[in-house]
């Protein structure tokens, strides 16, 4: 059922160079120093830009939405925007850091915490920023299986999921039945309310408007200032260059067999197969 992964083979005649950036700074005693802040800042800006791009597409898809059949497309963009933001938040405030080779877990955690604190300082990200608050909805997004189990176990009667609320109020049902008994809970698993710009995950509410504004502030104001502040200190040891440690390439016939199966799969479902990759 799976595709055969082509073997990468050593090709002596290959002459393809890859762009690289130096990440090693060595002092007179030949000791390595910190990871370049420039490289970390670049990743922060990259994830912010990805998130902002998907939010733009969210608004476009929502405006074009003609019914529930389009809801998955809207949520695909929202989920991508949230995932990029979660990656960014881990850069800015690391959690669940694992032990790295040659370091204890405590030392690894401390170094990551120091990195996060430095990035927050450089990018002027305070504790109230939506770029950090997004971590509160990481579990509802990433651990959806556990949320389903939990709402069933607590006696929920029904759920709203992948729901896009119309302009107005979002109802979650009455608290009491007509006979006075407490009504079983109606849970909003994932609800997007575009009019007020809110994402709702059960009892957790995330401000999409504020998140989008914070992303653009980082991209267009905080990031350029932060990069400029470290450029002089890191210019000499983070120079860009081209190089190749190994001249490896995939065997063309192996790749073509994979691509032929992939083309057949897409064409069999009425989809085009991109060419010229």
Image (tube, rainbow, N blue to C red):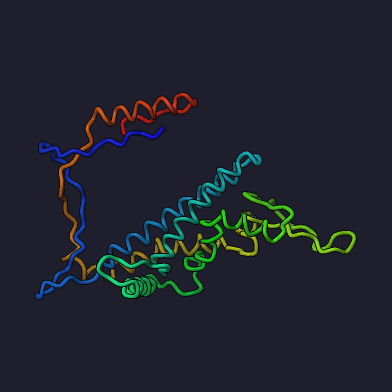
Q: In the rendering, at what x and y percent does residue 199 appear?
A: 60, 58
**Location of residue 113 (image quadrant):** bottom left
Horizontal and vertical percent position of residue 227: 30, 66
Q: Is residue 4 above or below residue 142?
A: above
Q: Is residue 106 left or right of residue 194?
A: left
Tell me: 211 left or right of 234.
right
Residue 229 pos. (x, y %): 28, 71
Q: Residue at x 16, y 54 (%)?
A: 241
Q: Is residue 204 visible?
A: yes
Q: Is residue 11 above or below residue 21?
A: above
Whether residue 169 is visible here, answered yes or no, is no
Task: Give the residue at the far right of this rendering.
Answer: 179
Q: Quadrant of the C terminus?
A: top left
Q: Residue at x 60, y 57 (%)?
A: 147
Task: Identify the image quadrant of residue 2.
Answer: top left
> Which residue lies at the image location 18% right of the left edge and 65% below the top edge?
24
Pinpoint residue 183: horizontal percent, then vertical percent: 80, 60
User: Looking at the rendering, which quadrant does residue 39 occupy?
Assistant: bottom left
Q: Which quarter of the figure is the N terminus placed in? A: top left
Q: Which is more toward the observer, 190 or 71?
A: 190
The residue that appears at 69% across and 57% down in the rendered structure is: 187
Count of number-bearing discs: 0
Q: Is residue 207 left or right of residue 81?
A: right
């Amino acid at each position: 059922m799976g595709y055969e992964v082509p073997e990468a083979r050593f090709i002596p005649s290959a002459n393809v160079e890859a762009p690289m950036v130096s990440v090693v700074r060595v002092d007179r005693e030949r000791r390595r120093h910190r990871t370049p802040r420039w490289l970390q800042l670049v990743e922060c800006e990259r994830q912010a830009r990805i998130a902002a791009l998907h939010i733009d597409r969210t608004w476009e898809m929502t405006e074009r939405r003609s019914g529930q059949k389009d809801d998955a497309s809207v949520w695909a963009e929202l989920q991508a925007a949230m995932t990029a933001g979660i990656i960014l938040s881990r850069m800015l405030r690391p959690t669940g850091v694992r032990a790295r080779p040659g370091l204890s877990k405590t030392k690894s955690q401390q170094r990551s915490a120091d990195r996060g604190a430095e990035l927050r300082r450089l990018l002027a990200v305070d504790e109230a920023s939506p770029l950090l608050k997004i971590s509160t909805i990481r579990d509802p997004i990433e651990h959806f299986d556990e949320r389903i189990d939990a709402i069933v176990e607590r006696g929920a009667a029904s759920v709203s999921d992948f729901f896009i609320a119309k302009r107005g109020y979002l109802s979650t049902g009455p608290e009491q039945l007509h006979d006075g008994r407490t009504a079983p809970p109606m849970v909003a698993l994932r609800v997007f309310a575009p009019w007020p710009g809110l994402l709702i995950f059960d009892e957790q509410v995330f401000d999409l408007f504020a998140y989008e504004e914070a992303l653009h502030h980082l991209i267009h104001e905080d990031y350029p200032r932060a990069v400029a502040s470290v450029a002089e200190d890191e210019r000499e040891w983070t120079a860009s260059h081209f190089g190749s440690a190994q001249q490896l390439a995939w065997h063309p016939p192996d790749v073509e067999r994979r691509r032929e199966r992939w083309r057949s799969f897409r064409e069999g479902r009425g989809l085009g197969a991109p060419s010229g990759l």
